[in-house]
Amino acid sequence: MRNELKRRLKRDEQVYGTWITIESPIVAEMLSTMGFDYFVFDTEHSPLDIYQAQTLMQAMRGQETTPIVRAWWNDLVAIKRALDIGAYGVIVPWVNNREEAELAVKATRYGPKGLRGCGPRRAAMFDPDYLKTADEEILVICQIETRKAVDNIEDIASVEGVDVTYIGPADLSASLGHLGDMSHPDVQEAIDTVYDATKAAGKAAGIHQGSGRTIKERMEKGYNFITIGNDLVFLKNGVNDHMKKLGIK
């Protein structure tokens, strides 16, 4: 296994991706030709289950786009199953402290370093070196989405094996008492705190669709792992733009 996306992040490069939430192989196939660096198959908030996520991965064309799964929880089984279907990394939601970050990392590592059960199935089907390389190649992304996580961000970012911290803006705004208001100064201050601690730890900083600022501003700030939308938003915006051009609305 060789994870070029992880190498690019370690070189402090910027990568851009989208979330896949529509349970249609043709959507995943089409978007995989559009130049995204990564896909996140969302099994936490979208209707995708692990079987559907695997089917959508199989529909992807080429090797330009790296498949990642957002696990439904910081759970050994959830993370193991995401990796066994072929994900090159996981986004782990609701990581609030050092212990939870360490658990997320251990869930991606085989024994004796970690707790991942050995049964890689599709992930190793075409890769005879998978068991030798997976521990070092899997990308671990800890989602920061609570006040507690922000308070503990230095500890989280310092955990060996955590590659990226990733802002979950909606839950973070709710945790700070400003549900849905990602632009609120308190939320932006928290986001900046996470960014600074992450960079100080030498890790990559991730952000979701601007999170109260424009994507361009986040790019200029120096974020590395930047989500620029999701399939459902692209569909909605495309239809709206087309109807406006036709004078229908």
Image (cartoon, rainbow, N blue to C red):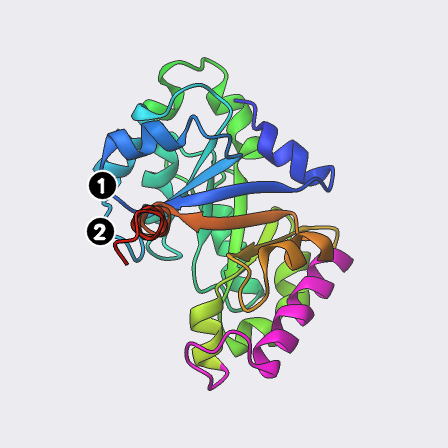
Q: Residue furthest right?
A: 200
Amino acid on which disc 2 is placed: Pro
> Image check: 242 left or right of 47?
right
Q: Is residue 64 visible?
A: yes
Whether residues under marks 1 and 2 lie with C-beta atoms below 8 angstroms apart, the answer is yes
Residue 10, percent across and down?
Answer: 70, 39
**Is residue 146 or residue 180 the one in the foreground?**
180
Q: Quadrant of residue 81?
A: top left
Mark 1 Cα-neighbour bin, 10 Å: few <14, some 14–19, many ≥20: some
Does dot 1 land on a helix, a strand or a loop?
A: loop
Q: Which residue is mark 1?
A: 23
* The stretch drawn in magenta includes residue 195: yes
Q: Which residues are magenta?
A: 176-200
Q: Position of residue 185 (x, y in %)?
A: 61, 82
Residue marked by disc 2: 47
User: Extreme bottom residue here?
Assistant: 177
- Label 2 sits on a secondary structure element that is loop
Marks 1/2: CA–CA distance: 7 Å
Q: Is residue 178 above or below residue 31?
A: below
Query: Disc 1 residue type?
Result: Glu
The answer to whether one can see residue 222 in this image is: no
Task: Please state the horizontal and vertical placement of residue 154, each as a whole percent of the image.
Answer: 68, 66
Left or right: 167 with respect to 14?
A: left
Mark 2: few/some/many CA within 10 Å (<14, 14-19, 20+): few
